[in-house]
């Protein structure tokens, strides 16, 4: 009997929060190995934290071939597919996969894209529709207003890059906070990607190479609790402090705490639904394993 995919909707603040992106750097696993990692996570004790399997549209034919023959994968296996700006080839790949028998086993639950301009958002909405979640990556160095206005106008969602493979890829705390404030003000769901495979802020290796350079990274709990604080109407300074905390963040069924701050289960539920929906990570074991240190008991 095949293992079942993680249940939805959210029953705890961490349900379905990790979109597994093992195909991407720094892990960069082959498709078969990435699927095996996803299947192992779906069978494990932390399966409730597992979200979608992230692929590019170009990966879809290879994935379809493996789904015909590979046993032990969760059913369904929800996908988040990255499509390129104005790519007819990617649209064709998504349509072909959508209309194939394997789509019942691995439905495309969401799409992700990085348009080169706000005008590309209209093309995405027109081409792919709004029947499923569509995340639009925004450039934190640009004026976010036109981007977020266009995303909201078409009923789409935002995506923010919180790191990368170089120290320069990590946005400054004030810059990231401004984006979080803009999302919360518009009640715009968003996902994060890159550099969030640790639970809390700290200095970590940028890759898995033994001689990897190191950089200060955000933790996914920092981003989650900062967003929750903004949803709860807490002062901006408190949200900024939460982005910078290296420890002391606790999350559980009774909500989240940091020192004397308490964020209720209702606030956390709204934050996950209308704010920080998930984050992409090339590792599942690292972020899930580190959460145990911060879980309320």
Image (cartoon, rainbow, N blue to C red):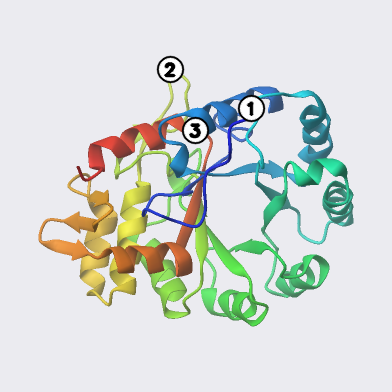
Near-viewer residue (98 or 216): 98
Q: Secondary structure at mark 1?
A: loop
Q: Position of residue 182 (x, y in %)?
A: 44, 75
Q: Is residue 34 above or below residue 223?
A: above
**Are the residues at dot 2 and dot 1 in contact (C-beta closer than 8 Å)?**
no
Q: Which mark is residue 166?
A: none
**Are the residues at dot 3 and dot 2 in contact (C-beta closer than 8 Å)?**
no
Locate residue 286 relative to residue 194 in the image: left or right: left
Q: Label 1 neighbourhood size at 10 Å, few (<14), some (14-19), many (20+)? A: few
Q: Earlier in the sequence, mark 2 or mark 1?
A: 1
Residue matched to label 3: 283
Residue matched to label 1: 1
Query: From mark 3 to mark 1, how far is it between C-alphas?
Result: 26 Å
Residue that sits furthest to the front in the current view: 1
Q: Nearer the viewer, mark 2 or mark 1?
A: 1
Near-viewer residue (122 or 211): 122
Q: Which mark is residue 210?
A: 2
Query: From mark 2 to mark 1, how far is it between C-alphas?
Result: 40 Å
């Amino acid at each position: 009997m095949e293992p079942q995919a993680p249940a939805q909707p959210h029953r705890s603040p961490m349900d379905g929060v990790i979109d597994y992106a093992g195909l991407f750097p720094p892990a960069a696993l082959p498709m078969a190995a990435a699927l095996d990692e996803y299947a192992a996570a779906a069978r494990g004790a932390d399966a409730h934290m597992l979200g979608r399997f992230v692929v590019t549209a170009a990966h879809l034919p290879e994935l379809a071939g493996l789904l015909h023959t590979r046993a032990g994968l969760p059913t369904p296996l929800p996908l988040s597919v990255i499509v390129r700006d104005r790519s007819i080839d990617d649209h064709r790949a998504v349509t072909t996969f959508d209309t194939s028998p394997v789509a019942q086993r691995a439905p495309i639950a969401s799409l992700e894209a990085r348009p080169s301009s706000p005008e590309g958002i209209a093309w995405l909405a027109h081409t792919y529709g709004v029947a499923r979640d569509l995340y639009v990556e925004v450039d934190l160095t640009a004026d976010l207003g036109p981007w977020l206005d266009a995303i909201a106008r078409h009923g789409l969602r935002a995506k923010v890059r919180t790191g990368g493979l170089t120290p320069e890829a990590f946005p400054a705390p004030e810059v990231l906070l401004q984006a979080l404030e803009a999302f919360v003000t518009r009640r715009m769901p968003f996902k994060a990607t890159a550099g969030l495979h640790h639970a809390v802020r700290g200095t970590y290796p940028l890759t898995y190479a033994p001689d990897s350079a190191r950089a200060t990274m955000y933790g996914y709990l920092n981003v989650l609790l900062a967003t929750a604080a903004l949803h709860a109407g807490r002062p901006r300074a408190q949200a900024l402090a939460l982005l910078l905390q290296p420890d002391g963040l606790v999350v559980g069924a009774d909500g989240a705490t940091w020192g004397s701050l308490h964020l209720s289960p209702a606030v956390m539920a709204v934050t996950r639904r209308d704010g920080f929906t998930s984050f992409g990570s090339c590792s599942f074991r690292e972020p899930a394993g580190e959460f145990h240190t911060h879980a309320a008991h």
